[in-house]
Amino acid sequence: MVGLHELLKKATKAFKEVAIPSPDLDARILLEHVLQKDQSFILLHSDYVLTESEETLYESHLKRRLKREPISKILGEKEFWSLPFKTTQDTLDPRPDSETLIEAVLKQFKDPSKPHRILDLGTGTGCLLLTLLSEYKNATGIGVDFSQKALAVAAHNAKALSLEACVELLQSNWCEKLDGQFDIIVSNPPYIPPNHKKALEPELHFDPKEALYGDSQDGLEAYRRLSHQFKKHLAPQGKIFLEFGQGQHNEVRDIMISAGLTHLSWHKDLSQIIRCGVFYGS
Protein backbone atom coordinates (compact mmCIF):
# COMPACT_ATOMS: atom_id res chain seq x y z
CA MET A 1 0.00 0.00 0.00
CA VAL A 2 1.82 3.08 -1.26
CA GLY A 3 0.78 6.63 -0.37
CA LEU A 4 0.86 9.64 -2.70
CA HIS A 5 4.28 10.82 -1.50
CA GLU A 6 5.99 7.53 -2.27
CA LEU A 7 4.02 7.16 -5.50
CA LEU A 8 5.31 10.52 -6.75
CA LYS A 9 8.89 9.69 -5.75
CA LYS A 10 8.74 6.46 -7.74
CA ALA A 11 7.19 8.13 -10.80
CA THR A 12 9.69 11.01 -10.70
CA LYS A 13 12.60 8.58 -10.55
CA ALA A 14 11.27 6.66 -13.58
CA PHE A 15 10.83 9.91 -15.54
CA LYS A 16 14.38 11.04 -14.71
CA GLU A 17 15.75 7.77 -16.08
CA VAL A 18 14.36 8.57 -19.55
CA ALA A 19 15.48 12.22 -19.36
CA ILE A 20 12.03 13.81 -19.20
CA PRO A 21 12.74 17.54 -18.68
CA SER A 22 10.37 18.16 -15.73
CA PRO A 23 9.98 14.76 -14.05
CA ASP A 24 8.53 15.84 -10.70
CA LEU A 25 6.07 18.31 -12.26
CA ASP A 26 4.86 15.80 -14.85
CA ALA A 27 4.37 13.09 -12.24
CA ARG A 28 2.30 15.46 -10.11
CA ILE A 29 0.18 16.82 -13.00
CA LEU A 30 -0.75 13.29 -14.05
CA LEU A 31 -1.62 12.38 -10.47
CA GLU A 32 -3.77 15.50 -10.06
CA HIS A 33 -5.65 14.52 -13.20
CA VAL A 34 -6.28 10.99 -11.94
CA LEU A 35 -7.48 12.23 -8.56
CA GLN A 36 -9.31 15.27 -9.97
CA LYS A 37 -7.66 17.21 -7.13
CA ASP A 38 -5.16 20.06 -6.96
CA GLN A 39 -1.64 20.19 -5.52
CA SER A 40 -2.83 21.12 -2.03
CA PHE A 41 -4.76 17.86 -1.73
CA ILE A 42 -1.63 15.87 -2.54
CA LEU A 43 0.42 17.83 0.00
CA LEU A 44 -2.18 17.44 2.75
CA HIS A 45 -2.98 13.77 2.04
CA SER A 46 0.42 12.27 1.35
CA ASP A 47 -0.66 8.92 2.84
CA TYR A 48 -3.75 8.59 0.64
CA VAL A 49 -3.80 5.26 -1.20
CA LEU A 50 -5.20 5.15 -4.74
CA THR A 51 -8.26 3.08 -5.45
CA GLU A 52 -7.84 0.23 -7.92
CA SER A 53 -9.29 2.26 -10.80
CA GLU A 54 -7.16 5.30 -9.92
CA GLU A 55 -4.03 3.16 -9.77
CA THR A 56 -4.79 1.59 -13.16
CA LEU A 57 -5.34 4.99 -14.76
CA TYR A 58 -2.19 6.48 -13.20
CA GLU A 59 -0.06 3.55 -14.36
CA SER A 60 -1.48 3.97 -17.87
CA HIS A 61 -0.60 7.69 -17.83
CA LEU A 62 2.93 6.94 -16.60
CA LYS A 63 3.55 4.34 -19.32
CA ARG A 64 2.47 6.79 -22.00
CA ARG A 65 4.66 9.58 -20.62
CA LEU A 66 7.64 7.21 -20.34
CA LYS A 67 7.30 6.76 -24.11
CA ARG A 68 7.62 10.58 -24.28
CA GLU A 69 4.00 11.18 -25.21
CA PRO A 70 3.28 14.80 -24.19
CA ILE A 71 1.19 15.54 -21.10
CA SER A 72 -1.25 17.44 -23.33
CA LYS A 73 -1.90 14.39 -25.50
CA ILE A 74 -2.35 12.14 -22.46
CA LEU A 75 -4.81 14.53 -20.82
CA GLY A 76 -6.35 15.62 -24.12
CA GLU A 77 -6.08 19.33 -23.32
CA LYS A 78 -3.59 22.19 -23.62
CA GLU A 79 -3.88 25.75 -22.37
CA PHE A 80 -3.32 28.60 -24.82
CA TRP A 81 -3.75 32.30 -23.98
CA SER A 82 -5.26 31.10 -20.67
CA LEU A 83 -8.00 29.22 -22.56
CA PRO A 84 -8.44 25.41 -22.54
CA PHE A 85 -8.19 23.62 -25.89
CA LYS A 86 -8.88 19.99 -26.65
CA THR A 87 -5.95 18.43 -28.52
CA THR A 88 -5.59 15.00 -30.09
CA GLN A 89 -3.17 12.98 -32.22
CA ASP A 90 -4.81 14.68 -35.23
CA THR A 91 -3.84 18.22 -34.17
CA LEU A 92 -0.70 20.16 -33.45
CA ASP A 93 -0.53 21.03 -29.77
CA PRO A 94 -1.08 24.75 -29.08
CA ARG A 95 2.28 26.19 -28.03
CA PRO A 96 3.34 29.34 -26.17
CA ASP A 97 5.44 30.41 -29.19
CA SER A 98 2.23 30.82 -31.20
CA GLU A 99 0.89 33.35 -28.69
CA THR A 100 3.32 35.73 -30.41
CA LEU A 101 0.85 35.86 -33.33
CA ILE A 102 -1.98 36.85 -31.01
CA GLU A 103 0.13 39.63 -29.50
CA ALA A 104 1.08 40.87 -32.97
CA VAL A 105 -2.56 41.00 -34.10
CA LEU A 106 -3.61 42.90 -30.98
CA LYS A 107 -0.88 45.49 -31.63
CA GLN A 108 -2.07 46.07 -35.19
CA PHE A 109 -5.83 45.95 -34.57
CA LYS A 110 -6.34 47.84 -31.33
CA ASP A 111 -10.11 48.31 -31.32
CA PRO A 112 -11.68 45.17 -29.76
CA SER A 113 -15.18 46.23 -30.82
CA LYS A 114 -14.58 46.19 -34.60
CA PRO A 115 -16.40 43.44 -36.56
CA HIS A 116 -13.23 42.08 -38.12
CA ARG A 117 -13.28 39.15 -40.54
CA ILE A 118 -10.59 36.68 -39.49
CA LEU A 119 -9.08 33.79 -41.47
CA ASP A 120 -6.98 31.02 -39.93
CA LEU A 121 -5.22 28.80 -42.46
CA GLY A 122 -4.31 25.38 -41.06
CA THR A 123 -6.48 25.91 -38.00
CA GLY A 124 -5.85 22.58 -36.22
CA THR A 125 -7.31 22.93 -32.72
CA GLY A 126 -8.60 26.38 -33.70
CA CYS A 127 -6.47 27.99 -30.98
CA LEU A 128 -5.41 31.02 -33.05
CA LEU A 129 -8.84 31.77 -34.52
CA LEU A 130 -10.81 31.11 -31.34
CA THR A 131 -8.41 33.13 -29.19
CA LEU A 132 -8.76 36.10 -31.54
CA LEU A 133 -12.54 35.76 -31.54
CA SER A 134 -12.47 35.79 -27.74
CA GLU A 135 -10.59 39.11 -27.93
CA TYR A 136 -12.66 40.69 -30.73
CA LYS A 137 -16.21 40.11 -29.52
CA ASN A 138 -17.91 41.35 -32.72
CA ALA A 139 -15.61 39.53 -35.14
CA THR A 140 -16.37 36.45 -37.23
CA GLY A 141 -13.94 33.96 -38.67
CA ILE A 142 -13.21 30.97 -40.85
CA GLY A 143 -10.86 28.18 -39.88
CA VAL A 144 -9.45 26.18 -42.79
CA ASP A 145 -7.83 22.77 -42.53
CA PHE A 146 -7.23 19.85 -44.87
CA SER A 147 -7.91 17.36 -42.07
CA GLN A 148 -11.55 16.63 -41.27
CA LYS A 149 -10.46 15.13 -37.94
CA ALA A 150 -8.67 18.36 -37.01
CA LEU A 151 -11.77 20.35 -37.94
CA ALA A 152 -13.83 18.15 -35.61
CA VAL A 153 -11.48 19.10 -32.77
CA ALA A 154 -11.76 22.79 -33.70
CA ALA A 155 -15.56 22.49 -33.72
CA HIS A 156 -15.47 20.96 -30.24
CA ASN A 157 -13.29 23.82 -28.98
CA ALA A 158 -15.50 26.45 -30.58
CA LYS A 159 -18.54 25.00 -28.80
CA ALA A 160 -16.70 24.61 -25.49
CA LEU A 161 -15.71 28.30 -25.63
CA SER A 162 -19.22 29.37 -26.71
CA LEU A 163 -17.86 30.75 -29.97
CA GLU A 164 -19.54 28.41 -32.46
CA ALA A 165 -21.98 31.10 -33.63
CA CYS A 166 -19.20 33.28 -35.06
CA VAL A 167 -17.05 30.49 -36.55
CA GLU A 168 -17.18 28.67 -39.88
CA LEU A 169 -14.93 25.66 -40.45
CA LEU A 170 -13.90 24.72 -43.98
CA GLN A 171 -12.15 21.60 -45.22
CA SER A 172 -9.81 22.79 -47.95
CA ASN A 173 -6.25 22.47 -49.19
CA TRP A 174 -5.26 25.98 -48.06
CA CYS A 175 -7.35 28.50 -50.07
CA GLU A 176 -8.64 26.20 -52.82
CA LYS A 177 -12.29 26.23 -51.65
CA LEU A 178 -12.18 29.61 -49.94
CA ASP A 179 -14.23 32.67 -50.85
CA GLY A 180 -14.19 36.20 -49.47
CA GLN A 181 -11.74 38.71 -48.06
CA PHE A 182 -10.44 39.09 -44.55
CA ASP A 183 -9.04 41.86 -42.36
CA ILE A 184 -6.85 39.50 -40.38
CA ILE A 185 -5.18 36.39 -41.83
CA VAL A 186 -3.19 34.19 -39.45
CA SER A 187 -1.35 30.99 -40.22
CA ASN A 188 1.13 28.63 -38.63
CA PRO A 189 2.02 26.43 -41.62
CA PRO A 190 4.34 23.40 -41.40
CA TYR A 191 7.89 24.74 -41.57
CA ILE A 192 10.31 22.14 -40.16
CA PRO A 193 12.71 20.88 -42.88
CA PRO A 194 12.25 17.10 -43.36
CA ASN A 195 15.92 16.41 -42.63
CA HIS A 196 15.53 17.89 -39.11
CA LYS A 197 13.25 15.08 -37.88
CA LYS A 198 15.91 13.23 -35.91
CA ALA A 199 16.97 16.38 -34.04
CA LEU A 200 13.50 17.14 -32.66
CA GLU A 201 12.41 16.48 -29.09
CA PRO A 202 10.66 13.08 -28.85
CA GLU A 203 7.35 14.69 -27.82
CA LEU A 204 6.93 16.25 -31.27
CA HIS A 205 6.62 12.82 -32.86
CA PHE A 206 3.12 12.59 -31.37
CA ASP A 207 1.93 15.56 -33.45
CA PRO A 208 0.65 14.94 -37.01
CA LYS A 209 3.60 14.98 -39.41
CA GLU A 210 1.72 17.00 -42.03
CA ALA A 211 1.34 19.84 -39.50
CA LEU A 212 5.06 19.88 -38.69
CA TYR A 213 7.15 19.19 -41.75
CA GLY A 214 7.33 21.29 -44.88
CA ASP A 215 7.41 19.53 -48.27
CA SER A 216 10.54 21.23 -49.60
CA GLN A 217 14.14 20.88 -48.45
CA ASP A 218 13.98 24.17 -46.51
CA GLY A 219 10.52 23.39 -45.09
CA LEU A 220 8.91 26.51 -46.60
CA GLU A 221 6.87 25.12 -49.49
CA ALA A 222 3.56 26.02 -47.80
CA TYR A 223 4.68 29.68 -47.59
CA ARG A 224 5.43 29.70 -51.32
CA ARG A 225 1.98 28.33 -52.11
CA LEU A 226 0.19 30.66 -49.73
CA SER A 227 2.11 33.75 -50.87
CA HIS A 228 0.31 33.65 -54.23
CA GLN A 229 -3.12 33.18 -52.63
CA PHE A 230 -3.03 35.88 -49.96
CA LYS A 231 -3.79 38.95 -52.11
CA LYS A 232 -7.07 37.51 -53.36
CA HIS A 233 -8.32 37.09 -49.80
CA LEU A 234 -6.81 40.15 -48.12
CA ALA A 235 -9.27 43.00 -47.51
CA PRO A 236 -8.17 46.63 -47.99
CA GLN A 237 -6.09 47.57 -44.91
CA GLY A 238 -5.91 43.88 -44.05
CA LYS A 239 -2.78 42.22 -42.67
CA ILE A 240 -1.21 38.76 -42.69
CA PHE A 241 0.43 37.24 -39.60
CA LEU A 242 2.73 34.25 -40.18
CA GLU A 243 4.54 31.99 -37.76
CA PHE A 244 7.82 30.32 -38.78
CA GLY A 245 10.83 28.57 -37.29
CA GLN A 246 14.02 29.96 -35.82
CA GLY A 247 16.16 31.67 -38.44
CA GLN A 248 13.56 31.41 -41.23
CA HIS A 249 12.31 35.00 -41.08
CA ASN A 250 14.42 36.41 -43.91
CA GLU A 251 13.51 33.57 -46.27
CA VAL A 252 9.80 33.98 -45.45
CA ARG A 253 10.07 37.74 -46.03
CA ASP A 254 11.70 37.19 -49.42
CA ILE A 255 8.97 34.71 -50.42
CA MET A 256 6.23 37.20 -49.52
CA ILE A 257 7.95 40.12 -51.25
CA SER A 258 8.39 38.03 -54.40
CA ALA A 259 4.60 37.56 -54.42
CA GLY A 260 3.99 41.32 -54.24
CA LEU A 261 3.43 41.66 -50.49
CA THR A 262 5.10 44.17 -48.19
CA HIS A 263 6.82 43.31 -44.92
CA LEU A 264 5.68 45.43 -41.96
CA SER A 265 7.24 44.05 -38.77
CA TRP A 266 8.80 41.15 -36.87
CA HIS A 267 7.70 39.87 -33.46
CA LYS A 268 9.79 37.82 -31.01
CA ASP A 269 8.63 34.97 -28.77
CA LEU A 270 9.51 34.61 -25.08
CA SER A 271 12.92 33.18 -26.02
CA GLN A 272 13.62 36.33 -28.05
CA ILE A 273 13.46 34.37 -31.32
CA ILE A 274 11.80 36.11 -34.28
CA ARG A 275 8.66 33.97 -34.50
CA CYS A 276 6.08 36.06 -36.38
CA GLY A 277 6.11 38.30 -39.44
CA VAL A 278 3.42 40.81 -40.42
CA PHE A 279 2.73 41.53 -44.11
CA TYR A 280 0.22 43.50 -46.17
CA GLY A 281 -0.69 44.03 -49.82
CA SER A 282 1.32 46.67 -51.66
Image (tube, grey):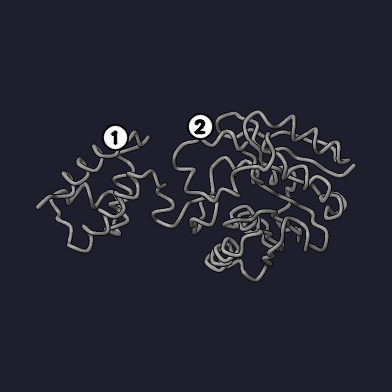
The residue sitting at 74% across, 51% down in the picture is 185
Residue 37: x and y in percent read 29, 57
Front tag of 2 and 1 = 2
Instruction: Please give left or right for residue 105 compared with residue 58 in the image.
Output: right
Residue 48: x and y in percent read 15, 54
The residue sitting at 73% across, 57% down in the picture is 118
In the image, residue 196 sits, relative to residue 158, either above or below, namely above
- Which label belongs to residue 257? none
Residue 84 in sight here:
no
User: Residue under circle 1?
Assistant: 16
Cα–Cα span, label 2 and label 1: 20 Å
Residue 155 in sight here:
yes
Instruction: Please give left or right for residue 257 compared with residue 61 in the image.
Output: right
User: Residue under circle 2?
Assistant: 199
Q: Nearer the viewer, residue 65 or 216?
A: 216
Element type where label 2 sits in the image:
helix
Q: Which kind of residue does numbered mark 1 sit on?
A: Lys
Question: What residue occupies the far left of the structure in this picture?
Answer: 1
